[in-house]
Structures are given as C-alpha cells and as structure tokens.
Image (cartoon, grey):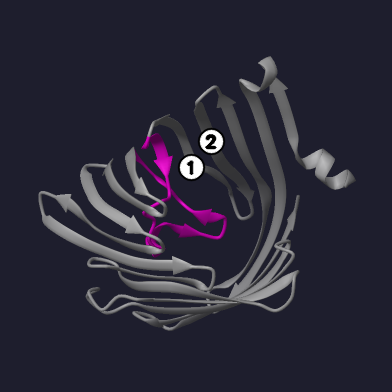
Amino acid sequence: MQGRLYSWVSIPLLSGLLSFNLLPSGFWRFEGGSAGQQALFGVRLEANLLAGWYELRGSGYATFGSGVWGGVRELYMLIPHDEIRLYLGKRAVYATPLERTPWGEEGRWGIYGQYRLGEGMGLEAAYVEGQGYVGGRVGGLEAGSWLSPAGLTPRVGVSGELGELYYQWNTGWWGRLRWALDGASGLEAWGWWNPQAPEGKLLLGLGYDRERQVRLGADISLRPIEAWRLWLEFTAP
C-alpha cells in the first residue's frame, strides 16, 4: 500500500468537475543476444486530466543506457458528444508491429472519431499523418481500410481475452496469445509475418510475466535476417 501511495497521485478539484491523476513508474531492462548486450533504465509517466466532459490523457518515457532519449507514446484530448467520441492528438489505436517498442506501442498524431451504434458496435473514421481511415467494430471484430493517394490498404482483426490477430495489406499478419497460469502470472506468445516485404518478415517471441512487474522473454527473427534476443525487465510502480 505504501508503494501505491507514492506512485499514484489523485487530486479532485471543484467537486469532481476537475481532477488530475498521475502514475509514475520506473523500469530496468537488460537485453542480450546476437547483436550484443545492453542495459536500460528509466522512468515512465501516465497522466489523466478530467475537466467536466473533456478528458486529456498522456503517457511518455525517458530512457538511459548507451544514450539518453525519450518520447511521448500517447497524448490526446477526448471530446464526447452523445454517441460520438472525438480524439485529438497522438493515439496507438491503429498501431502495427512497426510502432511497437519495449515501452508500449507508439501512437501517431491525428484526428480519431467513433460513432456508437449499439452495445459493442460502432463506426470509426480517422485522419492520421496524411491518410484517412474508415471502418467499424462489432464486438471483438474490426474491419476497415486506410485511404491515401496510393490507394486502399485493408485492415481486419479480432481481439479478446485470449489475445488478438490482425492483418493489414502493407504490414502482413501479427498477433498475440495469452495464457493465465494463475492469478499473478502468465505466458504470452507473439508473431509477425509479412509476405509483402521484399525479403519477407518473420518474427516470433515468447514471454513470461509476474504481477506485471517482472517480465522475461525471447525474440527470434528468421527473416530477412537471422537474429535472437533475450531480455529481462523489472517495473517498479
């Protein structure tokens, strides 16, 4: 409990019309494999500001290792109106393996909209970095397409408690499977296969986590190059 008190700051103001929540955490990660070894440590920060009907969310990180760098994973404002949800800023809702990092999926700047049709059903539209997206969701099913001067880029996917599986024309297939071992630990397997790449792309991985604070895993690349990596990560809330 003492650790959570230090890691979570919540300040309600104006009888709940305005509140600010802050969740910092620290991490340490060691990687070793065919490309050598490196140790990383740093901090992550998640923040949420609720002002009436509007909500501002953000998450970022700073990392120290062979160099010093940082980034903002997501930073957006939510503007709700009846059945419409409008998001302005950087989101990772349509992320692919190209945006995946050890600290989470990197979002992209744009305008994202959702229209709720019913329970678990809705239409979506977005304008992200020079291209548009139109699609919809029914339960855990998702289908749509990116639109750009180069043409259409279809995207379909399914997600649920056991994991997710996606396909996008220019990215290929990627997905994750999760197995709960008990109430505090679990296994996770992931893969990415892109037959559209000039030399192909095939990446596989397996990981174990304990209370989401200790994670151990391995990544294996078979195409276009053969490489492997083992990693161990600790997170302190």
Secondary element type, mark 1: strand
Residue depicted at 71% across the width and 47% down the height: 25
- The first of marks 1 and 2 along the sequence is 2
Secondary element type, mark 2: strand
Mark 1 neighbour class, 10 Å CA radius: few under 14, some 14 to 19, many 20 or more: many
Residue 74 disc label: 1
Q: Which residues are magenta?
A: 83-110
Please check the rendered image and state whether residue 92 is part of the magenta-colored stretch, yes or no: yes
**Identity, as a three-letter code, of the amino acid under mark 1:** Glu
For the residues labelled 1 and 2, say whether their Cβ atoms are less than 8 Å apart: yes
Residue 57 disc label: 2
Rendering coords of residue 214 (x, y %): 73, 66
Residue 39, image quadrant: bottom right
Residue 84, above or below 107: above
Residue depicted at 82% across the width and 39% down the height: 6
Residue 35, above or below 44: below
Residue 113, image quadrant: top left
Rendering coords of residue 104 (x, y %): 53, 56
**Identity, as a three-letter code, of the amino acid under mark 2:** Arg
Rendering coords of residue 15 (x, y %): 69, 18
Identify the residue at the far right of this view. Answer: 2
Residue depicted at 61% across the width and 55% down the height: 66
Q: Is residue 51 left or right of residue 192?
A: right
